Image: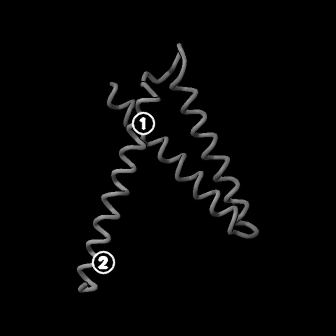
Amino acid sequence: MEEWGSFASVTVISFSLVILLAGIFTAYFGTGRSRTMGIIFVLMGLAVGAAWGYLCMGQNALIDVALIKVLKQAFLDIAAAILGFVIAAVLFLLAIMKV
């Protein structure tokens, strides 16, 4: 059951982080309705992240998962994925530019 809790935690944390960052970007650069949607996305990201943290922490946690351990592993996984993407993209660009 721990695997499903970790999977759900990484999924929810990733969702809340991406929607929060997209909301900040949209609220800052948008105008009118898109700025309003950006603010809604920021609030949604904060609410989802806070709710998940509340459900996973404390003595009476509804979801039994070591949240700090999962957060650390999630950020390491995301960093590794980004690093792999950057390396592959640089190699691809070097190959097609015939350097």
Image-based side of 7 in relation to 43, left or right: left
Which quadrant is home to the N terminus?
A: top left
Number of marks drawn: 2
Quadrant of residue 58 within the rendered picture = top right
Instruction: Identify which residue is drawn at 54% across, 33% down.
Output: 52
- Alpha carbon distance from label 1 to label 2: 32 Å
Question: Three-letter amino acid code at disc 2?
Answer: Leu
Q: Mark 1 vs mark 2: which is more N-terminal?
A: 1
Residue 66 placed where, x, y %?
43, 25
Residue that label 2 marks: 93
- Residues under numbered marks 1 and 2 in contact, where contact means CB atoms less than 8 Å apart: no
- Residue 32 image point, x, y percent: 76, 68
- In the displayed structure, 72 sits above or below 95; it is above
Task: Give percent across and percent down for residue 20.
Answer: 59, 51
- Residue at image mark 1: 72
- How is colour applied across the structure in the image? one colour
Q: Residues within 10 Å of mark 2 (few under 14, many from 20)?
A: few
Q: Residue at horizontal 30%, vertical 58%? A: 84
Residue 22, percent from left and from top: 58, 58
| Crowd class of label 1 (few under 14; some 14 to 19; many from 20; radius 10 Å) | few
* Residue drawn 46% across the image and 29% down it: 68
Which residue is outermost to the right?
Answer: 32
Element type at marker 1? helix
In front of the other: 88 or 18: 88
